[in-house]
Image (tube, rainbow, N blue to C red):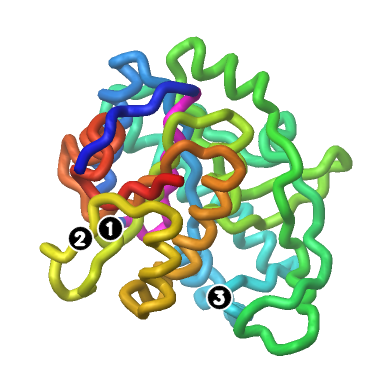
Amino acid sequence: MAVSEPAGGPVVVKLGGEVVQGPHLAAIAADVAELRAGGTPVVMVHGGGPQATDLQKRLGQTPKIVGGRRITDQDTLEVMKMIVAGKVNVDLCAALVAAGAKPVGLHGASACTVLATKRPPTVVSGGGPDPVDFGFVGDVVGLNDALIALLTRDGYVPVLACLGADQRGNLYNINADAVANQVAIRLDARALVLVTDVPGVMRDIADPSSRIGRLTVADGRRAIEEGVVTKGMIPKLEESFAAIAQGVRAVHIVGKLAKGDLTRAVKTPGEVGTVLVA
C-alpha cells in the first residue's frame, strides 16, 4: 500500500558504481532533473567499487577485501581518488547535465563537504575474531551543510563522491552507503533512495512479482531471521534500519529503473521498489 510523500529536507539518492556504469543511468538522471525542476532538492552520493577494482587490477594491484569491505592502503587510496572523485563523479555529472540538471561534483576535500576521521581497527563479520585495520578508511563525523544548502537553494544538485577528509587535509575512503546514510540523517532528508542492481527487496530473487512494496523495521528483521532476505541485501537492510533509528523518515531500495520510476518511488512510496519505514 502506498503512503504519502513525507515532507522535510532533500531527497538523498545513492548510486553504486555498478549503477553509474550501467544501462539505467540516463533514466535515473532524467528523474533527478524532473524532481529538481519541480522544486524538490536532491543530493546525490555515489560509490565506484567496480571501477576501482578494475583499475587496481590493470595497475597490477590486488584488491584486499575483508568481510566485504575494502582495505585501503596508500596505493588503493590513489586509485579511489582517481576513480571515485574523478571518473565516476564526472560521468555522473555529465549524465545529469545531459538530462537538464545542474550538478556540482564534490568530495571530502571540497571545503570538507564530508568531514571524516580515520576508522580505528574494528572487528567485522567475516573478518575473524581480531580487529582489522582498514588503513585509509574513515567514518563520517560532519558535513558542510551550509555549502550543500547554498547549492540546493539555488537549484544545483550536489554530487558527493564517497571520499571524506579531515581538517588537516587527510583523505579517507568511505563506504558510499555509510556516506548516504549520514548525509540523509544530518540533512533531515525527506527520503533516502538506495539505487541497486535489483528492483527491491524480493521474497524470491528470481521472481520479480515477489517484490515487497513496504517493510517496517520489525518486518524487515523478521524477513532476515526467516531467511526470506539473504546475501548482500542483509547489510543494506541493517544499515537502513540504523538510518531510520537515527531519524530518516523512509529508505527506498530500488533498481533497474525506467524513466519515471525514481520519481514515482519518491512521490508514491511502495509503488516502485521497497520502502522501509519505522
Residue 155, percent across and down? 43, 14
Amino acid type at mark 3: Gly
Compared to residue 53, the image places residue 26 above or below, namely: above
Q: Of 250 and 84, which appears nearest the observer?
A: 250
Q: What is the secondary structure assignment of the residue under circle 1?
A: loop
Pointer 2 residue: 211
For residue 200, the mark is 1
- At a point 46% along the width and 41% down the height, the residue shown is 90
- At a point 16% along the width and 65% down the height, the residue shown is 210
| Residue 91 seen in the current view | no
Q: What is the secondary structure assignment of the residue under circle 2?
A: loop
- At a point 52% along the width and 39% down the height, the residue shown is 248
Amino acid type at mark 1: Gly
Residue 139, percent across and down? 72, 53
Amino acid type at mark 2: Arg
| Quadrant (top left, top right, bottom left, bottom right) of the N terminus | top left
Q: Of 9 and 246, which appears nearest the observer?
A: 246
- At a point 51% along the width and 54% down the height, the residue shown is 241
Compared to residue 234, the image places residue 243 above or below, namely: above
Range of residues picked out in magenta: 9-21
For residue 68, the mark is 3
Task: Verify CB contact (< 8 Å) between mark 3 and mark 1.
Answer: no
Task: Verify CB contact (< 8 Å) between mark 1 and mark 2.
Answer: yes
Specify whether 131 is left or right of 267: right
Marks 1 and 2, how far apart at CA: 6 Å
